[in-house]
Image: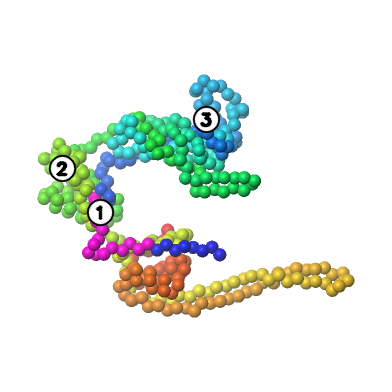
Amino acid sequence: MKKILTLIILLSFSINASAVVKIRDIAKVDGIRENQVFGYGLVVGLNGTGDKDQTRFTTQSLVNMLERTGITVNADDVKVKNVAAVMVTAKLPPFARAGQLMDVTISSIGDAKSIEGGTLLLTPLAAPNGQIYAVAQGPISVGGMNVSAGGASVTKNHPTAGRIPNGATVEKEIPFQMDISQIELFFSSYSLADVVNAKTAINTFMGAEIAAITSPSNIKVTIPGEFSSSYYDFLNTVLNLEIQPEVFARVIMDERTGTIVMGSEVRISTVAVAHGNLNITISNHVEVSQPEAFSNGQTVVALEPELEVAEEDAKLMVVPEGVTVSDLVKALNAIGVTPRDLISILQSIKAAGAMHAHLEVI
């Protein structure tokens, strides 16, 4: 029987010592963002773990590359077991300058078994508009392996994907324009309280009403005249201001892994919980019937099913009103719940209206 490990994470913070975050951790500035680039390339130097001959686009790409170097070959004579076709992806950071280095991720798109030990050939990286902004090349670091011998194989992690730290060089800068008279802040959370707190923090720090809420997730900050020549200094000051984020009463459950995450604001009303399991075991017992000596009968093997039903004693527990998350978990552990039982109990408590939190199953 496969056992599932239950991981319960408690996000508990004292009211008097609530965590504070900087505005830069929950908001983004309009115009300052990463840009996705990608490209198609070839990984060479594999130890027989590359694409098979049936992967025609790998063969075609290799032939085209050799022809560009002045070598003419017949595609039918090319073996690609040491070559793999890959897609190269990267994130072009904001304000990236020509010559800046960035990490790239390499993923096999053919039927290669592993790209461990391979080297990525020079690969242009383009944006969705088709313009090339960077090039990537270098040896690949793979956090996995694929070993086979005598018909048996062992695979660890994902050997068909890897990374090249600082493997790409920015060749073209992405132009950007920013209005130095104001700052647009977009908040990633769905809490209007965070937006209000950020606006209050900015106005309090500056001693003037320079920040205004223009939407439930947007703040417009007017830059004072004395900071018109030091836009980035002022932006850094605003982003480093600290606020207390709103904490949601939420329970997240992943039934596949048995992981349960509960926020500190979760509260339980008075409720009684009964827990008990019904275990049904069906097994087959082998019965052998042999004929008498010197008879013409034959030995017969039959399977006789055996059914066993065992029901655990149900345990009734009363959870008082206003208990904290840690108290609830201790009480549930006291009655010996399993991962699936714990998820079922929490869902039942929510269905009974005794849990004052949003319950989400992923």
- The amino acid type found where label 1 is placed reads Val
Give the colouring mode of the picture: rainbow
Magenta region, residue range: 9-23
Residue 61 shows which numbered tag?
Answer: 3
Which one is earlier in the sequence, the residue at label 3 or at label 2? 3
Residue 130 appears in the rendering = no
Percent coordinates x, y for residue 111 in the rendering: 55, 40
The residue pinned by badge 2 equals 223
Q: Secondary structure at mark 3?
A: helix
- Is 361 left or right of 298, judged from the image as shown? left
> In the depicted view, which residue is nearer to us: 340 or 20?
20
Which one is earlier in the sequence, the residue at label 1 or at label 2? 1
Badge 3: few (under 14), some or many (20 or more) residues near its Cα, within 10 Å?
some
Distance CA(mark 1)–CA(mark 2): 23 Å
Residue 243 shows which numbered tag?
Answer: none
| Residue at the right extreme of this rendering | 294
- Is 302 left or right of 276, judged from the image as shown? right
Badge 1: few (under 14), some or many (20 or more) residues near its Cα, within 10 Å?
some
Residue 21 shows which numbered tag?
Answer: 1
Q: Nearer the viewer, mark 1 or mark 2?
A: 1
- The amino acid type found where label 2 is placed reads Ile
At horizontal 51% and vertical 40% (from top left) the residue drawn is 116
